[in-house]
Image (spheres, grey):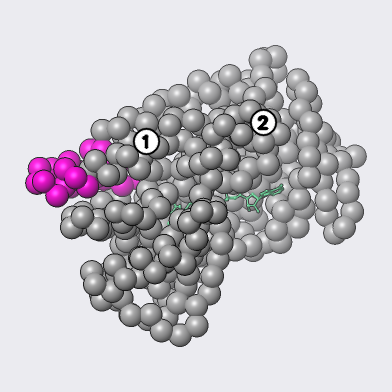
Amino acid sequence: MRYYDAVVMGAGPGGCMAARSLSDAGFTVVLLERERLPREKTCGGFVSPQAASLVEEAFGPIPTDCLASPRTVRGARLLCEGGGTYELPFPGTGLAVLRSRLDAHLATGCGAEVMDGCEVKDFQVERFHVTARIARDGREEMVEATYLIAADGAESMALRLLRPEFHRLYAVPHLERTMLVLCGGELDWDPEWMGLVLMQKGMGIARFFIRGDLIGLSVNHDAARGWRDELAGLTAFLEGRVGLRLGGEAMRQISASNRMAVGGHFNLGAGCALLVGEAAGLLDPWGFGIRLALQSGRVAAESLAESAGERITPHIRYRYRMQEILERELKQRRDLSGMVGDLDAASLAADRSRITRRDRRALRRRFSR
Ligand SMILES: Cc1cc2nc3c(=O)[nH]c(=O)nc-3n(C[C@H](O)[C@H](O)[C@H](O)COP(=O)(O)OP(=O)(O)OC[C@H]3O[C@@H](n4cnc5c(N)ncnc54)[C@H](O)[C@@H]3O)c2cc1C
């Protein structure tokens, strides 16, 4: 049995940032990642300027081999089937990254002991004591720590174990499957912008982007509504709107997004076990999650370090410190003006036309249900 001050579960941006901040505060930390690094993460790789600054403050400049082509990105353009097109810029210049490389770079530089190919199967949390059962190379062992930070993503096992009732009521119903198809082809689109598409009968907001020679198309789906119909709808729409022509063999990546925050249902954990990133429901309404994962990873680690030795469990301080961020996120969803998540939605607020009023209503529905 090995003993650490903190166990961090999941080597995405949330987990790596938490591990980095805890190591900086002098904690002994182990970062446990189920996959072998570098691992694939289904993602557009658009890193907002705030997220890029968070990475650079904690890990130094992002190496060029983690960047995609083109390296800089400017935000998103929203195309609504109802007719409207809106520019939603980042508040500055963002970066386009290759997630597998960026996440591996963050894990390598996080200052913790990193165990990849190591799945947390189960854990138990008592007051100031965590025991995790892990599986690695076909063997099981136990790891003990004082604290747990769980950053295990959209389908968080930690959320299910820590808050089973919340998980059943809010996380399960709001889990959306995502299919990303990467394919050759052409379209009339500036690769520095991510494309967001709001279809009248589609499942939420679909995305498209250009990465090097490939076009990425991602659609949401569930058991009732298969991804093929959604993808056919998106492709037909983009053929008409931006001249999309697909060609060559397609690669598919399946993933999930956790939209439980639509009704304000975040969950930051309990006692000595804190949830960060998508495990906590932290995803902005457009589906961008890297900034919130980094922010919450850092705040969780700082809250934990601040409350160490005080005999109060750290989730109270974590909740208190996250309150302002969460309230801001919820207000932005309701107001739909100024910054909304990572994007500046002023163009949506400024346009008073009938089409825009209808598009805003459709977006509000999406952001609140
Ligand atoms: C199609 C698509 C496109 C997207 N594009 C963007 C974008 O352009 N910009 C943006 O900001 N966001 C984007 N997102 C969202 C973004 O990818 C996520 O919000 C972000 O990665 C969340 O970070 P995280 O650290 O919370 O979790 P993750 O990055 O999901 O990391 C969780 C980690 O935990 C590990 N793990 C899970 N269970 C266990 C276990 N039991 N034991 C050990 N390890 C475990 C997983 O293997 C994984 O490595 C996109 C999402 C999708 C689906």
* Magenta run includes residue 93: no
Q: In which image quadrant can residue 339 be found?
A: top left
Q: In this image, 31 relative to 176: left or right? A: right
Q: Residue at x 49, y 30 (%)?
A: 265
Q: Residue at x 88, y 45 (%)?
A: 141
Compare residues 278 and 107 and report the one nearer the observer. Answer: 278
Magenta segment boundaries in residue numbering = 336-359
Q: Residue furthest front?
A: 224
| Residue position for label 2 | 164
Kind of element beneath mark 1: helix
- Quadrant of the drawing holding the N terminus: top right
Q: In this image, 320 relative to 142: left or right? A: left
Kind of element beneath mark 2: helix
Vertical order, 163 against 367 (above or below)? above
Residue 106 picture location, percent across and down: 59, 53
The yes-or-no answer for disc 1 within 8 Å of ligand 1 is no
Residue 48 picture location, percent across and down: 38, 51
